[in-house]
Image: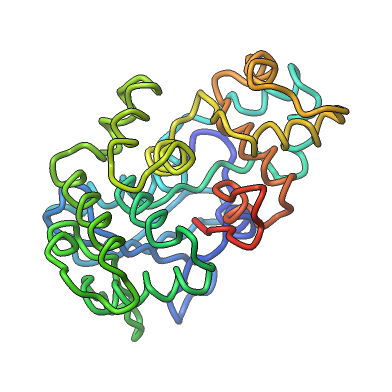
């Protein structure tokens, strides 16, 4: 596919990082994941040609290959028309400066709202290293494997597999119970990306908060970084801090002031927010967008 608007895979990788590569192509990325609909898993290898076109190979999905491809593109925010994103610079000089600094970078999302929710449960009150190790172990022991160029890549367990787990190394009973609830929500469609995007923000957050162990902060992370909301903003302290720094404000703005300012960012308010938070936390944006500003030790990665 040809991106609608600027997109640089290498730059996205630089700011949001974490993707594995096939052994024979260091510039490509590999995404291994359960395909929404939950009939299979897939591994998608994504590359960008010199002229900008995005090409890829889908492994293991069979008839679900088109769905897997679209899910991979959505993870990179390539399912959104970004041709007017640069126009924000004419309405807001601060955002324009960040666009020049970060090269009109689009948000990188979780592979699905389901994986976003499981991530937050696994990382709650744990270090990055602990949560990564637990996730990798679950994928290796219960996820589908894919052989690509002599290397093995594991998808996270499908929800129907996760919900049956009663014992897992590194997981206490309460965390397992929460994961089972998330798996059930994925299977009944509550966490479907397309469905969540079609709901009002308020309704979507209410439904996500009904999941055991998911509060307001995590709910916003699941919705905005999992479903991929484009034209709205989160209502947390992190954004207020980012705005305060970027606009040189003496005091922390209230959310009403931020919402008023964000009117100039339409129809890419979340994309502008991601740029602001990239600056707030430095260029480790993969961590920054979903971290708690008051506890840097518990920063979690996407």
Number of numbered discs = 0
Q: Nearer the viewer, residue 253 or 116?
A: 253
Coloration of the structure image: rainbow
- Return the residue nearer the eye: 249 or 264: 249
Residue 95 drawn at (x, y percent): 74, 30
- Residue 90 appears left or right of 36: right
Q: Residue drawn 67% across and 39% down?
A: 275
Position of the N terminus by quadrant: top left
Give left or right: position of 142 versus 43: left
Give residue 128's position: percent from left, percent from top: 53, 68
Query: At 62% across and 51% down in the image, what residue appears?
Result: 288
Q: Quadrant of residue 11?
A: bottom right
Task: Please tell me which residue is depicted at 75% across the width and 38% down the height of the picture.
Answer: 98
In this rendered view, identify the residue nearer to me: 210 or 57. Answer: 210
Residue 189 sits above or below residue 131 on the image: above
Query: Which residue is rendered at x = 55% and y = 27% of the image?
Result: 233
Horizontal relation, residue 55 to residue 7: left or right: left
| Vertical placement of residue 110 versus 236, above or below | below
**x%, y% of residue 59?**
25, 66
Looking at the rendering, which quadrant does residue 89 occupy? top right
Q: Is residue 83 above or below residue 43?
A: above
Q: Is residue 88 above or below residue 126?
A: above
Query: Percent position (x, y) of residue 237?
Result: 64, 35
């Amino acid at each position: 596919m040809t991106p609608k608007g600027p997109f640089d895979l290498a730059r996205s990788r630089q700011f949001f990082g974490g993707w594995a590569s096939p052994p024979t192509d260091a510039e490509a990325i590999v995404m291994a994941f359960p395909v929404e609909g939950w009939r299979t898993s897939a591994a998608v290898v994504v590359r960008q040609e010199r002229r900008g076109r995005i090409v890829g190979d889908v492994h293991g999905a069979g008839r679900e290959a088109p769905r897997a491809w679209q899910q991979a593109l959505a993870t990179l925010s390539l399912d959104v028309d970004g041709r007017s994103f640069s126009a924000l610079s004419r309405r807001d000089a601060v955002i324009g400066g960040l666009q020049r600094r970060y090269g009109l970078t689009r948000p990188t999302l979780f592979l699905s709202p389901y994986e976003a929710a499981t991530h937050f449960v696994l990382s709650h009150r744990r270090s990055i290293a602990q949560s990564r190790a637990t996730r990798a172990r679950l994928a290796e022991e219960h996820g589908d494997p894919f052989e690509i160029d002599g290397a093995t890549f594991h998808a996270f367990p499908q929800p129907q597999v996760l919900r049956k787990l009663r014992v897992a190394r590194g997981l206490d009973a309460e965390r397992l119970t929460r994961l089972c609830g998330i798996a059930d929500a994925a299977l009944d469609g509550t966490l479907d990306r397309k469905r969540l995007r079609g709901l009002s923000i308020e309704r979507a957050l209410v439904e996500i908060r009904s999941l055991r162990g998911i509060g307001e902060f995590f709910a916003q992370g699941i919705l905005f970084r999992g479903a991929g909301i484009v034209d709205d903003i989160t209502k947390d302290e992190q954004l207020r801090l980012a705005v305060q720094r970027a606009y040189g404000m003496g005091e922390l703005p209230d959310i009403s002031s931020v919402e008023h300012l964000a009117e100039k960012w339409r129809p890419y308010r979340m994309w502008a927010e991601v740029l602001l938070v990239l600056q707030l936390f430095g260029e480790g944006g993969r961590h920054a967008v979903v971290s708690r500003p008051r506890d840097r030790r518990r920063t979690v990665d996407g």
